[in-house]
Image (cartoon, helix red, strand yellow):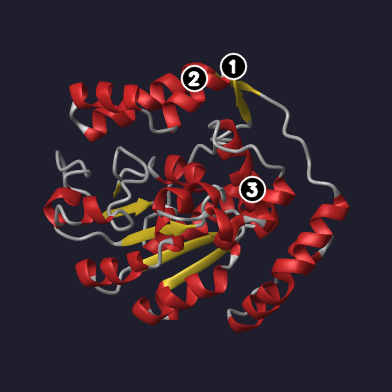
Amino acid sequence: MNKIDFLCVGVQKAGTTTLHNVLGQHPQLCLPQKKETHFFSDEDIYNKGTSHYLKYFNDSKPYRFYGEVDPEYSYFVESAERIFNTFGRIKIIFILRNPIDRAYSHYLMTKRRGLENLSFEEAMDKESYRINNKKDKMHYSYRSRGFYLEQLLTYEKYFGRENIKVLLFEEFIEKTKESVIDIANFIGLSDFEYEIEKVSNPASEPRFKKVQKFIHKDSKIKKSLGSLIGSKETKRRIAEYLESLNLKASNKKKITESTRKNLYLTYYKKEVDNLERKFNLNLTVWKNL
């Protein structure tokens, strides 16, 4: 194996975990055991070279297709050029979600990690003032990740519209099996009876907020402990395990209709209209406020 066939590049909080888990059932397809390698979005990892990236894939038996699902690749637009320079014109998949719902889900995730103290409305309004480095961009980019048109146009520039598949999250959730089959056909996979998972990332909240802050915030103690472990991958797995123990199910508070309407008119109406027109999409479901 020296080339991948497709990438699902986004977007974050739009069912990509479900897609990874369901598509990965196909016997002809090899996905990285670790969802979201961040190879093309993280410069430090990217600089390790293609041979490092290919190590994420199981080569114990021959597969017909290789791919990855990583929603960071849509937002960090330098990823598109890196992917093209590495593998040429492969197939690209986007799952787009109502940008307000996507932003709110992202906000709740950051809050769950102990990194957010502002209200959702305040966080949306003050986003540009809060992002000073790449880590901030990962955590607080609620609003800007929803500007999908620029992301799509960047990938179209490198891969051509004929190699880009765009689906809506709302349809993906309502008709998951049909959507997966549609994606599988786009990739070229043979017919397969998938077991569908409806919810791969259920709503949750921390049992202990201090534990979440320790996991996700930098500190001298954490840095000292990390130096003893060494491996970045091992540290990631330990953090994920600790977080899994510290999370419990929760009921997600809904966005008020007035907030939804205000955010749509302030940030997204023009974006949605342009996206709908330029990529021939029907986004009526996003406009029904």
Residue found at x 40% / y 53%: 134
Q: Is residue 91 visible?
A: yes
Q: Between residues 22 and 38, which one lies in front from this camera angle?
A: 38
CA gap, disc 2 to disc 3?
32 Å
Relative to 30, is 74 on the left or the right? right
The quarter holding residue 269 reads bottom right
Residue 13, relative to residue 222: is it above or below? below
Percent of width and height locating residue 186: 43, 65
The quarter holding residue 88 reads bottom left
Q: Mark 3 falls on what kind of element?
A: helix
Q: Amino acid at mark 1?
A: Arg
Q: Nearer the viewer, mark 2 or mark 3?
A: 2
Q: Report which residue position mark 2 lands on.
A: 211
Q: Amino acid at mark 3?
A: Ile
Q: Report which residue position mark 3 lands on.
A: 173
Residue found at x 59% / y 46%: 106
